[in-house]
């Protein structure tokens, strides 16, 4: 993932670091995790990077939760049907992990930074499996907070973070 992020950072050369981090955080797959790694690579202050990454990652979530089923229905009758089927299969795969524990499963799915997990996929699963909007939002936001803590330690390093508090 770091190679992809370095490539994006290079491609966005000349754009303010804050905007680069925001754009990367908006991207599916990379999300907040990629944004924090990019912020670290750009030597951005951790306290400045965290809210930018959270905002970038959370911005698409309400749209996914509210509109993805309608969008998928519209696109199923177009040339994008294979893409929609692939995304639904990915959601189905993620749902198997999540549905055992519902809200807590969604929280962990979003919060533990592993390949194929995150707020985008978690929102897709929540929408396609008809989670209550309030439950989905709380679990996804909680998961983003957990992912932020984990990725901040990974991106900035434990010694750096400890030094901030001493």
Image: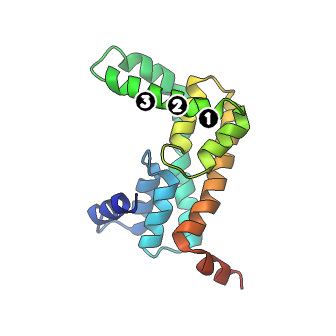
Image disc number at residue 87:
3
Residue 53 on image: x %, y %: 52, 58
- For label 2, the SS is helix
Q: Can residue 102 be seen in this view?
A: yes
Q: Name the residue under label 2.
A: 93
Q: Which residue is drawn at 69% across and 48% down?
A: 142
- Distance in Å between CA atoms under marks 3 and 2: 10 Å
Instruction: Say what secondary structure mark 3 lies in.
Output: helix
16 sits to left or right of 53: left
Contact between labelled residues 1 and 2, with CB atoms less than 8 Å apart = yes
Determine whether 39 is above or below 87 in the image: below
Q: Residue at x 52, y 34 (%)?
A: 63
Q: Where is residue 77 in the image (x, y as percent from the top left)?
A: 33, 13
Which circle marks residue 138 in the picture? none
Q: In this view, does 85 lie to the left or right of 57?
A: left
- Does the residue at mark 1 contact the one at mark 3 (Cβ under 8 Å)? no
Which color scheme is applied? rainbow
Between marks 1 and 3, how big is the CA–CA gap?
16 Å
Q: Earlier in the sequence, mark 1 or mark 3?
A: 3
> Would you say 73 lies left or right of 144 here?
left
Q: In this view, does 64 lie to the left or right of 99?
A: left
- The residue carrying mark 1 is 97
| Label 2 crowd (10 A; few <14 / some 14-19 / many >=20) | few
Q: Is residue 65 visible?
A: no
Quadrant of the rendering where the C terminus is positioned: bottom right
Q: Foreground mark, 1 or 3? A: 1
């Amino acid at each position: 993932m770091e190679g992809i992020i370095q490539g994006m950072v290079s491609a966005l050369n000349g754009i303010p670091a804050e905007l680069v981090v925001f754009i990367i955080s908006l991207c599916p797959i990379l999300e907040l995790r990629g944004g924090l790694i990019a912020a670290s690579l750009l030597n951005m202050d951790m306290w400045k990077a965290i809210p930018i990454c959270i905002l970038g990652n959370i911005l698409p979530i309400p749209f996914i939760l509210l509109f993805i089923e309608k969008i998928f229905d519209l696109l199923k009758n177009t040339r994008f049907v294979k893409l929609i089927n692939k995304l639904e299969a990915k959601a189905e795969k993620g749902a198997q992990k999540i549905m055992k524990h519902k809200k807590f499963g969604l929280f962990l799915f979003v919060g533990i930074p592993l390949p194929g997990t995150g707020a985008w996929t978690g929102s897709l699963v929540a929408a396609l499996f008809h989670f209550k909007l309030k439950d989905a939002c709380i679990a996804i936001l909680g998961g983003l907070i957990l992912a932020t803590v984990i990725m901040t330690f990974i991106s900035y390093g434990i010694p750096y973070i400890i030094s901030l508090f001493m």
